[in-house]
Amino acid sequence: MSARTLPAPSVPLAQSPLTSVALAVLGLVASLSALSPAWAQQAAPAPSPSASAPEATASKAGTQTQDSKDASQTLDRVEISGTRASLQRSLNLKRNAALVQDSISATELGRFPDDNVADSLSHITGVSISRTAGGEGQKVSVRGLGPEYTLTTFNNRILATDGEGRDFAFDVLPSDIINGADVVKSAQAAVMEGAIGGVVNLRSASPFDQPGQHGLLRLEADRNTMSRLNGGKLSGTYSNTFGSQLGVLVGLVYADRKVRTDTAGNDGGWTRNPISDPAANWTGNAWGGNIDPNGNGVLDPDEEGLIGPGQFRVGSVMEQKKRLALSGKVEWRPADNFKLVVDGMRTRLDSPQVGYQQSFYTLFSPGRWSNMQVSNGVVTGFTMDNSDPELRLNPELLNLTTHRVVDTALYGANAEWKATADLKFNGDVYTSTAKRHSGGQDTYTVLRMNQPNVTTVQLTGSQVPSITTTLADGRDLAQGLAAGQFGANDFNTHYLGLSGDNIDDRINGISLNGTWSLDRFNIDSIQFGISSTRRKKSRDLVDNAINGGENYYSGDNAINVGNLGGNVLDQNLHLPNFMNGVSGNFPRNFLGFDVPNYLAALQAYNGKPRPDGTTYDFSQAAPVWNPLQSYRVKETTTSAFVQADLSGDRWNADVGVRLVHTRTSSTAWDAKIVDLVENGPFNYTATYAAPTPLVETGSYTYGLPSANFVWHFDDKLQMRLGAAKTMARPSVEQLAPTSTTASVAWGDFTQVYGGNAQIKPYSARQYDASLEWYYARNSALTFAVFQKNIKNQITTSWQTGVDIGVPGHLFNVLKPINGDKARVRGMEIGFQHLFDNGFGVRAQYTRNNSRSWVGGEERPLEGIAPATSSLGLLYEKGPWSLSATADHTDEFVSAINVLGPGFNERAKAITWLTAQAAYEVNQWLRISIEGRNLTDAKQSYTLGDGNIVLPQGYNRWGRSFTVGASLKF
């Protein structure tokens, strides 16, 4: 008999500590361990390792069952209701899994502990997330490895994505259609390949989880205290079973939420002079000439490596997120030996963003800066007072809009057939799609102030420098914007960037797996299977960079905005709490312009004379298909596996191999620059030859062996060991031989290659070991260590002074390449204890140590936080349910060698605090309130080499609160 389905006292997966609290938690555990015999006496005795079903646990709100299945086994029913029961079920999943796995479960059908699945995943040991507008969780990283190392599936089926790559954006999927999620960190032959960090498998509910007729209707309203914006959500779930043969479940979600994100950054980057010493390996990035404080026109020794600001901006991004989701599942069980499940879900995320920003283009060129102040190798202050319009500061209004409408769908059918008492089969077929068509609808539009002025800039170390601009007519920029003294006549048209992707992703998959039960020679069963996945992903970039349209209304051909009419400048923005806590003297009020009105006004200007002797024609600035960054990628994967499941008196194990063969075919286009015209400083127009197609093919075959072993010291203590070879495929866009020279428009002569079909997948030899002590009912302390030796990690190469065939200009060339190797090792600590009096504590701490080598040179791995942690407290008794969780991510390197070797961009540490309170009025009605980001955390970035530290970026989302009511029937 297999020992794998070890019954267990239930606990959820460790759900969080702060770094500073982790050691204190361990101390608490040590003291608790002395009392564990008493707890054990109070708790029901734990079943023996040979038992086959987890113990069912009653809850205060009734009884519901869960028949959950992962890729390697079927777990028996577990009763669940409320937060404590959710944590218990999650811990059972962890304890009974054959792999190193952590899970989260809904507290009730269609209700996660957090409003967002990604936020809930962040409580799991070893998981960190990135956030999008409004502070919402979006991308998931496991054990310090970025989203590109993570595979996201829904009911064990790969989810199509709306981005260029494979990493899944969780904000497209409302949490209400998910009933659970498993984070699988180790590897097994029977589990789908494609991840080195981990597999995140999202699970939908089954109508047989709660036999009979059930329904849940939930209404929510939310408010952000920083932006004073409101939103709401309506969700409903209905399920019914008809005897033991047929079950039906349907769900509907509609949400409409408004959010604001305040931002600041150095969008144009920092300028750094070259360094003559070849060992420094830095040739400079100054477009307008080397920064020259003494004005002698020579790069003096004390000016080498000197840094100054290129551009900085400040503003706010407004977003309205509308979500609509439909989900359903039908289960038919006509006989004891057969089950058919047909399920599907379809979601639409409609979340247009509008960013209103002020931009200050301070880039150095001779004669542009005076009265320069230098400190520690950085120009910290200067004056801009040149009478030449191209050399003075021209404050800009910047409007960025993002048209993000994403349609995601997944439909599938799964059949289980027990052919004989010892042989059963499982067949699955599915299709998954994602579509986002925003071609030509994203904007990066700039209006430039046309008034003579004198400006002083002082770097203070804050996120935004102090800036004072006094116009020739006596108006002060900051004071005048606050008083409404500026209007359309003060601005000219300038940069008009119109772009956007049309992305279509389709995945078709089919698999047939079998299990042959032996129950002899310590072999419980042999699992085997074959599967095929075919993916087609296309990207069409539609923009006006390829045709030079972005500069059609700039320079000598600029138009005074006052002459356009059309109510272009339609807002004088006085945003509540804007940049509170950010020091510095800079404009905190600014004008916003309406892009649709602006484009309509430009079209209405057609036929009027241009200074160059032609007439204005908006079609010359309109977006067109850009072949240079468009592609078609087809990827076909066939895999087969065999796995033996073994067990003995106090152990269980598995050993197997998965064979994977992948073929890729990609099409991209190339177009050479045939003419390059300089319109003015930092302003060029390129003319391209007709595009020619480039077709590349590639293939690879991997054998992925794996072995896992679990030793049960007793009913409470077990040890896991695992070893495997794993792989993660290159991001889809890195398989297409695209290239672009779009940066020549602003004077940066760089050719960027997107990829090629010959890039090899990441591969890793990984090792896992964990010790899990389930010392009391609903409580556990776990400790794990891991190491991943990665080969062929994908990084970039940078070559300077390359002749790409453009007369008079040498280019920098940026290409994706397979690096030498990388090593990631770390440890995880998880702790959970649920007291009998209703209180509970959850904590986790993960530490990573990563190193990588490219061309024999050691580099940090980007995007890997050296430590994550979280701490959660909860109370649930009677009608009350209370909880609070703090998730902490340490500072990490987000980009390397930005201004030369050792000048890395770093994301500063952040702690995210959430809290919830709920009251069950009666068996039908539950009301709740939830607070997110209660500490008003901000995400900021710095750039430096350890000696110099420069501000690089800033995002603030504010606190938000949600009140909700759930009606059950």
Image: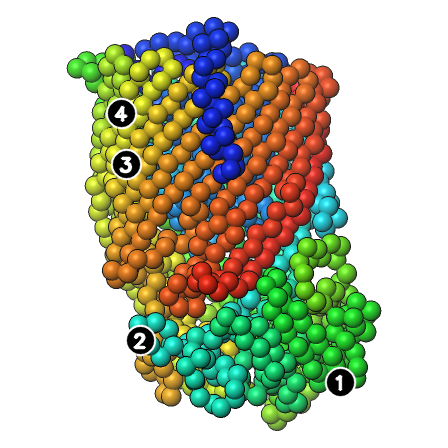
Which quarter of the image is occupied by the C terminus? top right
Label 2: element kind: helix
Query: In the image shown, does 947 or 599 lie closer to the viewer?
Result: 947
Give me the disc on residue 270.
none
- Mark 4 closeness class: few <14, some 14–19, many ≥20 residues within 10 Å: many
Report how far apart the C-alphas of labels 4 and 3 lie in the structure: 12 Å
How far apart marks 1 and 2 lie (CA) works out to 46 Å
Which badge, 4 or 1, is on the more N-terminal residue?
1
Q: Residue at x 54, y 38 (%)?
A: 887
Residue 764 in picture, x, y percent from top left: 27, 44
Which residue is denoted by mark 4 in the rendering? 709
Task: Please provide percent x and percent y for residue 895.
Answer: 43, 59
SS at circle 3 = strand
Residue occupying the point 60% across, 84% down: 370
Query: Which residue occupies the foreground of this view, 272 or 523?
Result: 272
Residue contact between numbered discs 2 and 4, judged by CB atoms under 8 Å: no
Q: Which residue is mark 1?
A: 472
Question: In the image, residue 250 lies at what x, y percent?
Answer: 57, 29
How far apart marks 4 and 1 lie (CA) works out to 77 Å
User: Identity of the amino acid at label 4?
Assistant: Phe
Within-10-Å neighbours for mark 3: few <14, some 14–19, many 20+: many
| Up-down relation of residue 591 to residue 316 (above or below) | below
Among the two numbered marks 3 and 2 on one chain, the one whose residue lies closer to the N terminus: 2
Task: Give SS at disc 1.
Answer: loop
Q: CA distance from mark 3 to mark 2?
A: 41 Å
Residue that badge 2 annotates: 278
Dot 4 lies on which element?
strand
Numbered mark located on residue 767 in the image: 3
The furthest residue to the left:
521
Query: Please, what is the three-letter code of the amino acid marked with disc 3?
Result: Tyr
* Residue 649 higher or lower than 602, as above or below: above
